[in-house]
Amino acid sequence: MKKLVSIFFAGFITAGAFAQAQDSIKHTELQEVIVTATRNERTMGALPMPVTLVQKAQIKTMGSLRLSDVLTEQTGLAVVPQVNGTGNGLQLQGLNPDYTLILIDGEPVIGRFTGSLELSRIAVGNIKQIEIVKGPSSSLYGSDALAGVVNIITDRPQGTRGNFFTRYGTNNTLDLSGDYSQITGKLGLYVFGNRYSTDGYDLSPDNYGKTVSPFRNYTGNFKITYKFGPKTDFSLSGRYFDQTQDFDYDVAAANLDEIRTSGAGTTKDWNLNPVLTHRFNSRLKATARFYTTHYQTQTRLNDVAADTLYYKDDFKQSFARPEINVEYFFSESNILTLGAGETFETVQTSRYGDEATRRQQTRYVFFQDELTPFKKLSIIAGGRFDYNSIYGSQFSPKFSTRYEVNDKLSFKASFGMGFKSPDFRQLYFNFNNSAGGGYSVLGTEVVGDRLAQLDAQGQIQTYLFDPALIGKLEAESSKAVNAGARVQLTNRLAADVNLFYNSIDNLIETQVVAVTTANQSIYSYRNIKRAYTAGLESNFTYPLTKKLNLSLGYQLLYAKDKDVAEKVANGEVFWRDPVTLVTKRLTPGEYFGLYNRSRHMGNVKLFYSDKQKGLDASVRVIYRGRFGIGDIRGDIQGGTIPSSDYNNNGILDTHDQFVDGYALVNISAAKTIRQGIRFQTGIDNLFNYTSPRYIPNIPGRIMYMSISYSFSKNQNNN
Amino acid sequence: MNTIKSIFSFLFVAMIAASFTSCKSDDPKPTLTATTFSNLAADPPSGGYNPNNGQPIGVTKKFTFFSFKSGAIVANADSASTKWDVGFNGTGIIVNSGTSGPGTAAAQVVTGIFDELLTAPDAGYLTDNKSVSPAFYAITRGSGNGWYSYNPSTNIITPIAGRVLVFKTADGKYAKMEILNYYKDAPTSPTSSSVDRYYKFRYIYQPDGSKKLSN
């Protein structure tokens, strides 16, 4: 760890030395426009909260295809494998994937598996920019925006232009995409299509089946804009996604025999979003929208030997949300936003014991005032009130302020509260493990009835809690502070530093609530855990020349269970060396914290762009420090992944076995020739780092080549 | 050189011998040292486990009794006597009292380090008393409640570090015990193929009736 810090420090010093020699380039990024932080278009530099922006040009230079590729490389974000070892979820400021809201054009993407959203579902070809707001944003977005928000802004119709792209690389991965945009009078049109297919990859060839099974998917997206008049705009956008994955692997049956299975899984989602905007006068603007989305998965696995259906899983989710919001300009320095809406959500799945449709509704109102009392000071204050049909009401305030000392130094601070409503699984899960000892896991909306039923049959031996208290679930909530500064250290070297502290209460965990007379445990969900994440994020940008830009990013993170930390402080936690069998008291410094969090993460990136010669290139080094792996039963191929908790005291301490830190090196180079033809080649994970057991989502070295052709009628536009 | 080495060795041996003799002359009582007992079989299933429901096959459901005084296992035929202090069956531990036996043994689980627990607590001892509730034992059962934790994903039983079992024996003496392992031959990292229900523990028994549990 020390090594890493000194590398950064050395980089910093050299950067400073260079800067004294030359001083001409101004940074323009402060002028870039962000919508996520306020729901209105605002320049990024003026925002009083931590925001990261990734633009199309950068995504193109990186050669990325899916959203997960882009997010992995951003400071403070970790794309971590999901619980069962497949798929990717996003960790932001050390918080689990469940707590970051993923939006496309301001509207939520649904379809999470055990809380995390598969980021590779989203293609990047139609992305204009990605905005990442860190810190709770429930004051504008409601549930799930507890850690922050990732908002994907897609392309809009602008002039007549088009682009065709194809990339081929390792693992027989082929990506074909194209988009077209046209504006005819009042009507604008944008269409995008993508086909992505891969053979997947196998990190443990000794086992039958692949780490990631082959799949192919299609993404379609359109946007139609129409100007009804000078004051009225209408847009209609939609997305369609369809993926099929071919599964062939052995699963471990209850008696530990392996059963060879074969089958397929499909994932589909679509959305539709009409938006009407009207400017009543120079002060008043109103927007009405009706977003609808649907997500479904279906998995069928056959027992190959017996030729019978071995496993089946169906999941359907829908979400609809009408919303109106009004923006009122009292003056240039006082802008008020008011909004109200209602969400309708349903889930229908075989996982909850029956295929009944479960519903919940949330009504909400929000307000936000952007105030600039004097030139150097800006304040944003807002809040949102949500009323949910199941768990009740929630108020989420947020207050942010920015003070500009001079054009070289500014300070930002924000306080916010966020929440995440109990998900459908926590409410309706109905699972009885007849093979593994007969225990049951019951959602809080079904546990009451089931317990009453068992009690009437005389099957309950003991309640571990007052039965009246079992089955009441509250939203998980957080309070967070972010405070930081941006300083232009020299004419070229800029530093952004942000300190964060997230305090999370009411975390939902499974807990045994009752024991049957047959000594079987009944688990349900309860608000029992408290945790915090705290740390520092810093980003340095330094243009070495006009064409070559160097950036450094670093995040220091402490993520701990508050109850465990308290017990450790009280001297109530011990560890026993499994070899010497000597027991010692754990000191606070020895408690490492939550699983799957790295204390240190960082990146060093070099981007090169020469527009005249049509060249662009990049070298990116992404580092993730050591971390611990929690209890995982097994990977997808039936292997058991040992927990990092080597001394078995139930917590991750410095005497346990960690997954070593690693660095990934990605390089790319592209050349654009006349008539908009662009060639690109690159290698992701140059040194072929893999960790089959612990990090199955890193596929090894990926080499690729791509070619694209773009045309545009108004040449000066691009 | 060799001569110097031998002189040092001689001095060293002499010092050790002196310290032993001084101990003997000053302190007539035997010193209290921890004794480790390995592979106490607590009804291991002769037929392993049923792969379909996880239930043990071929268990006797009888307890293995242990006496601190003799430091040995007591025959199961003596279950109705006060010859034993503590009994083991699977993860369940009973003391010779109340509904478990004719004695007056009692126990409690203390959070702390075995070596640091110098005297037995004055109060807080419990007896097995199923009339309180159907599952009331001095050493509380269930994962995380008493001496062990159970990991449902790996099915491994681990003795919780920092739990000291303090006993009042069947004849009113005090003893402390730390359970170290639950698997045969105490593997460092037990796996699902390790044979369970074999206790390894260390204990100190104070025969003089005092609460002093160390030197």
Image (cartoon, rainbow, N blue to C red):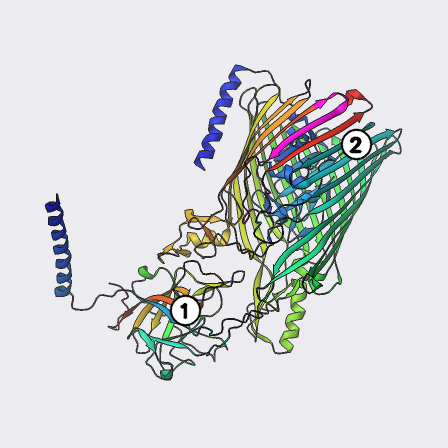
* A602 up-or-down from B70: above or below: above
The residue nearer to you, when weighing A125 against A390, is A125
Residue range in magenta is A672-698
Q: Quadrant of the N terminus of chain A?
A: top left
Q: Is residue A355 visible?
A: yes
Q: What is the x, y in percent for residue A349?
A: 73, 59
- The amino acid sitting under disc 1 is Tyr
Q: Quadrant of the C terminus of chain A?
A: top right
Mark 1–mark 2 contact, CB under 8 Å?
no
Q: Alpha-carbon neighbours of circle 1 within 10 Å: few (<14), some, or many (≥20)? A: many
The residue nearer to you, when weighing B38 against A184, is B38
- Horizontal relation, residue A412 to residue A322: left or right: left
- What residue sits 71% from the left and 63% below the top? A309
- What residue sits 59% from the left and 51% below the top? A85
- Horizontal relation, residue A291 to residue A703: left or right: right
Q: What is the x, y in percent for residue A622?
A: 55, 35
Which quadrant of the figure has residue A669?
Answer: top right
Give the total number of marks visible in the rendering: 2
Q: Is residue A99 visible?
A: no
Q: What is the x, y in percent for residue A625?
A: 50, 41
* A340 up-or-down from B213: above or below: above
Query: Does the segment drawn in magenta span residue A354?
Result: no
Query: Does the segment drawn in magenta span residue A676?
Result: yes
- Mark 1, secondary structure of its residue: strand
Q: What is the x, y in percent for residue B51?
A: 56, 69
- Mark 2, secondary structure of its residue: loop
- The amino acid sitting under disc 2 is Arg
| Residue designated by label 2 | A283
Q: Alpha-carbon neighbours of circle 2 within 10 Å: few (<14), some, or many (≥20)? A: few
Tag 2 subunit: A
| Residue designated by label 1 | B198
